[in-house]
Structure formats: structure tokens, C-alpha cells
Amino acid sequence: MAGARVLVHVRRAGAGGAAAFGQSVTGVFCPGHSDVALRPPFCPAKLGGAALGGRGAQPGVAAAVAVLLEAACGRVLLTRRATTLRHFPNVWVPPGGHLEPGEELVAAGLRELAEETGLRLEPGTFSWRLLGLWESLFPPSLSWGPPRCHHIVTYLGLRSAEPRERLQARLCPSPCEVSAVAWLEPPVLEAIAATEDGAEGSAPGPGSEPGSLPGELPATVGITELSADGFRSSQIPTGILLRRAPAHGPDLERVSTGTKFALGRWRAGPGRRDRE
């Protein structure tokens, strides 16, 4: 799959159709794969142009890439987005960002990983696979307002041959992008993937708050936060990472819906259980 690129096909709306939305995605494919981009049940794009009509300017569709970096021990790196960011502030996601014109998937993922975390992976020190494609809009629900950005995100799984300690020692996150990082263990990652975000209007389910955790999970997880003095080790309740996206009101610190999708694909990957 070397040199794989994402091809984004969009259909411009006709009169009386999805005109208010501007463009609608009809398919997103990676050569050699038949994977079509998925999206959450409350995604504004799923509701169609009628639901979006009269709500202001609508975004075009941009291509992005995000990287689930797995250390040799099986832990996966997630980052908490800075509170100053316009889109998904304070939400936990993998490193990622826009694809540049003509840029290859892995090259884009490695560039974004380096820009956001300072980690640079040398050729021959990692393997990779395509996890899937996800349609993402912000705000993610119409109850929060009209969409302001629209992305097709390609999630990649990168498995490093290096131990977590060596990767952690090279971390130098960008404070403009990242407020904290965490290397999460497989049981926590599996629980996050199983906590699906439901349709708009559904109440948060079990595990959405710090007090209701599966018995096998730790009460807290360790994170590294950025501060004015540099890095500091801290703990957050594991339940924060198991929250569901709220249907109404302000957003919460949580793991993004697309990240949960990618973790589910990562969990189901070939040989995944054999490495645990």
C-alpha cells in the first residue's frame, strides 16, 4: 500500500436537492480498498440539505489524516486538543491534520505527528495499515449550531518497534495544538471503543461519568500535561475518556467519535489479541 492516496468524490448539489449544504460526499476510497467513509448517526450530513437549509454558509469537504501510534508495548498515543482551537477544543484525538495537495497518506501522517508531538519516526522503525475513513463535521450535531468545517479523515494505525519510554522521551508537543498526551493501555482503549456515541437526543449511557466504570479498569489514567513550566505528570478519571458526546449544551472533555471508530478498527486488526 506504499504511496496510497485518498480520492474524495463529491457531488455538487442541484436545485431543490442538497443545495443548502453545497456538497455531499458520495464516496471516499483508498486504492486497493473498498472502504467507504462512515459517520456518526447524528452527523449533520446524514440529515441532508433540508435539515441544514437556512443555517448560514456551509463548508466544503477537505481531506485529513490521523495517526494511532502504537508503541512496542501495545499502548497507543492520544492527545488532548488545546482549549484555544476553534474545532473540538479539549477533546482527545490522535495526532492529525489536513492532507496537502499531492501528499501521500503515510507522509502526511508522519508530518502531522512530528508537528503536533515532536515525534519523528525513521523509516524501517514502524509498520502501518489503513484503519478506515470517517466523515467529520464541526459542530458534530445540529443542536450545537450549523457546520463550520467538513472533513473526510483517513485513520492510519502505526506500530512502532520502539518502547513507549523511548518515544515518550522524544515528545515535544506543540502548545498551540496539544494540551496533554497519554499512552493508554489496551483495556482502556477497548472500553473507549465500546462506548459509542448515540443519536442526537440520546442521553449519555453507562460509563459516561467517572463514577461508573467496568470493574477491570483503573479509576484514573496517567497523562502528561503541558504547562508554563514545561511538562507535568497528572491523573484524570478514566470515566472522562468514556463519556459520550452530549446531545445538547456545551461539549465535554472526551474522546472524539471518530477516534472511537478508529480504535474499534485498531482493536479488530490482524494479530491484535496475539500481541496482548
Image (spheres, rainbow, N blue to C red):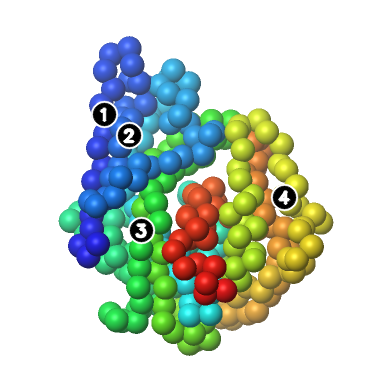
Query: How far is the residue under mark 1 from the one under mark 3?
Result: 25 Å
Tell me the amino acid under the disc marked 3: Leu
Crowd tier of the residue under label 2, counting other residues whose Cα lies within 10 Å: few below 14, some 14–19, many 20 or above: some
User: In what element is the residue under mark 1?
Assistant: strand
Crowd tier of the residue under label 3, counting other residues whose Cα lies within 10 Å: few below 14, some 14–19, many 20 or above: many
Q: Are marks 4 and 3 in contact (CB under 8 Å)?
A: no
Residue 25: mark: 2
Q: Looking at this view, name the residue that lies furthest to the right.
A: 211
Tell me the amino acid under the disc marked 1: Arg
The residue indicated by pointer 4 is 208
The residue indicated by pointer 1 is 11
Residue 26 occupies which quadrant of the picture?
top left
Residue 130: mark: 3
Crowd tier of the residue under label 1, counting other residues whose Cα lies within 10 Å: few below 14, some 14–19, many 20 or above: few
Q: Is residue 7 above or below residue 221?
A: above
Q: Looking at this view, name the residue that lies furthest to the top.
A: 16
User: In what element is the residue under mark 2?
Assistant: strand
Sooner in the amino-acid sequence: mark 3 or mark 2: 2
